[in-house]
Image: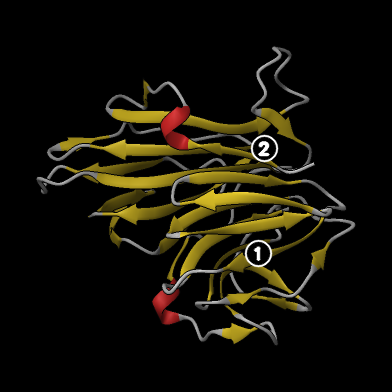
């Protein structure tokens, strides 16, 4: 059964020195408490961070844990190893396990908001990458959706450096359109609604979805996404 939670309904806390942290979905095998967010079977974790202007996060690393930061709004820099790289909204940033990294928003007044998506892997190391969806050629699903493959594996092609993740994508459904029906026997997915609203139809039930919703789609769920409105419906998809 799909599960939907808006990030605004989560109690925030402070993490990594200065970031406001809204905990999303977490690995149910590693969290024994009965929190309904502890439901991930293959993915490790999904959270939202916001770093205010003139602030930085702490300098840290994660052993045997790869991460993708997905920038939602603002501009800043990410330190990876010993070099700082500019980042902006729409960037998917791949952070290999075991390497120090840090987010910087110290030169700006506006908030820098991003998702933190985590996946357990064996061993450390890998190739750092940043890919903005605007730099990726779109592909259609044959019906009403357009997708941008930002990181991960698509068929036999490796488009972006990840090890435990299957893919990190952005997709949009045209006005009065819908996706093809989908069902994956080997993929767990988390959708995050970026812009506007629509309807997720899963296993015969309709679920309203809107900007800010985190949607857990378990392995084997059969679903489509419909957009009955006059504006495009946009979201990101994380799969493992």
Do we see residue 66 in this rendering?
A: no
Write the residue at 48% across / 69% down.
229
206 and 109: which is toward the camera: 206
Disc number for residue 225: 1
Distance Cα–Cα, label 2 vs label 1: 25 Å
Image spot of residue 26 (x, y percent): 64, 31
Vertical relation: 93 (above or below) 215:
below
Image spot of residue 35 (x, y percent): 65, 18
Disc 2, disc 1: CB below 8 Å?
Answer: no
Vertical relation: 103 (above or below) 231:
above
As drawn, the residue found furthest toward the top would be: 33
Vertical relation: 79 (above or below) 134:
above
Write the residue at 15% across / 40% down.
53
Tell me: 11 left or right of 221: left
Image spot of residue 180 (x, y percent): 74, 75
Give the residue at mark 2.
44
Do we see residue 153 in this rendering?
A: yes
Task: Name the front one of labels 2 and 1.
Answer: 1
Dot 2: within a 10 Å radius of its alpha carbon, few (fewer than 14), some, or many (20 or more) residues? many
Image spot of residue 99 (x, y percent): 49, 43
Write the residue at 78% across / 70% down.
181
86 and 200: which is toward the camera: 200
């Amino acid at each position: 059964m799909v599960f939907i939670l808006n990030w605004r309904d989560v109690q925030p806390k402070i993490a990594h020195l200065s970031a406001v942290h809204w905990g999303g979905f977490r690995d149910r095998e590693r969290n024994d408490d009965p929190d309904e967010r502890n439901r991930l079977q293959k993915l490790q974790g999904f959270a939202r961070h916001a770093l205010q202007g003139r602030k930085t996060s702490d300098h840290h690393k994660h052993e045997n844990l790869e991460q993708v930061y997905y920038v939602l709004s603002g501009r800043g820099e990410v330190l990876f190893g010993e070099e700082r790289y500019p980042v902006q909204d729409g960037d998917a940033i791949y952070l290999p396990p075991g390497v120090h990294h840090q987010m910087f928003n110290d030169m700006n007044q506006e908030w820098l908001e991003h998702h933190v998506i985590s996946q357990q892997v064996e061993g450390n190391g890998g190739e750092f990458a940043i890919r903005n969806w605007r730099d990726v050629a779109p592909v259609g699903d044959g019906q009403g959706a357009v997708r941008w493959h930002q990181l991960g594996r698509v068929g036999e092609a490796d488009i972006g450096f990840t090890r435990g993740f299957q893919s990190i994508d952005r997709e949009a459904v045209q006005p009065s359109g819908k996706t093809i029906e989908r069902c994956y026997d080997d993929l767990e997915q988390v959708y995050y609604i970026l812009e506007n609203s629509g309807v997720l139809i899963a296993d015969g039930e309709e679920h309203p979805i809107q900007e800010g919703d985190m949607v857990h789609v378990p392995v084997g769920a059969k679903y489509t996404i419909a957009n009955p409105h006059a504006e495009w419906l946009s979201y990101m998809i994380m799969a493992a």
